[in-house]
Image (cartoon, rainbow, N blue to C red):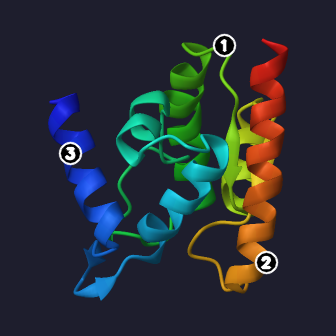
């Protein structure tokens, strides 16, 4: 199953053609750029094999990509996100966006870096500069292991 997931994301990320409700999903296409900043020189397949990605809430919204009320958000983060991250105690935690960082902090997890979310309205140049810093921070963390 993992192999199928890697193949699926590698295929769609490399073509930047993932869609949600018929519209381009900017998060996924931009995500490959961020992964390459963390793992320079590695293929997309290699980066996906070395990286654990998860949603910060881990509960489905009423509408896909929609709003979570704070009460549900807190409960889902405490029930699912916190135990998931507790199982990875030495992980580098990179929050993608302010909402993810806030959700992590409310569960007692301090992100190692908070990067601009790939689908944010910041310019591509601003995002890429921030992702370079995130990648540098991550590689520095790796060097200290």
11 or 93: nearer the viewer: 11
Q: Is residue 91 above or below residue 60?
A: above
Q: In the image, which disc is placed on residue 89?
A: 1
Q: Residues within 10 Å of mark 3 (few under 14, many from 20)?
A: some
State the SS at label 1.
Answer: loop
Q: Residues within 10 Å of mark 2 (few under 14, many from 20)?
A: few
Provide residue 44's location: percent of width, then percent of height: 40, 47
Say which residue label 2 marks. Answer: 126
| Residue located at (66% from left, 51% from top) | 37
Asked whether the beta carbons under mark 2 and mark 1 sit within 8 Å of each other, the answer is: no
Asked whether the beta carbons under mark 3 and mark 2 sit within 8 Å of each other, the answer is: no
| Residue located at (29% from left, 71% from top) | 15
State the SS at label 3.
Answer: helix
Say which residue label 3 marks. Answer: 7
| Quarter-of-image position of residue 144 | top right
Q: Residues within 10 Å of mark 1 (few under 14, many from 20)?
A: few
Q: Is residue 111 visible?
A: no
Apparent side of residue 62 relative to residue 30 in the rendered image (left or right) = left
Provide residue 89's location: percent of width, then percent of height: 66, 13
57 or 27: nearer the viewer: 27
State the SS at label 2.
Answer: helix
Label 2, label 1: how far apart the Cα atoms are: 31 Å
The C terminus - image quarter: top right
């Amino acid at each position: 199953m993992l192999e199928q997931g890697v193949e699926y994301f590698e295929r769609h990320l490399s073509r930047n053609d993932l869609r949600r409700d018929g519209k381009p999903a900017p998060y996924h296409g931009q995500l490959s750029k961020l992964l390459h900043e963390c793992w320079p020189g590695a293929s997309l397949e290699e980066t996906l094999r070395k990286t654990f990605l998860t949603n910060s809430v881990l509960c489905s919204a009423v509408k896909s990509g929609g709003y979570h009320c704070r009460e549900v958000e807190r409960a889902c983060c405490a029930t699912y996100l916190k135990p998931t991250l507790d199982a990875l105690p030495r992980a580098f935690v990179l929050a993608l966006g302010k909402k993810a960082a806030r959700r992590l902090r409310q569960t007692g997890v301090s992100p190692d870096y908070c990067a601009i979310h790939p689908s944010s309205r910041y310019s591509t140049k601003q995002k890429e500069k921030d992702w370079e810093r995130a990648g540098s921070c991550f590689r520095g963390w790796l060097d200290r292991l």
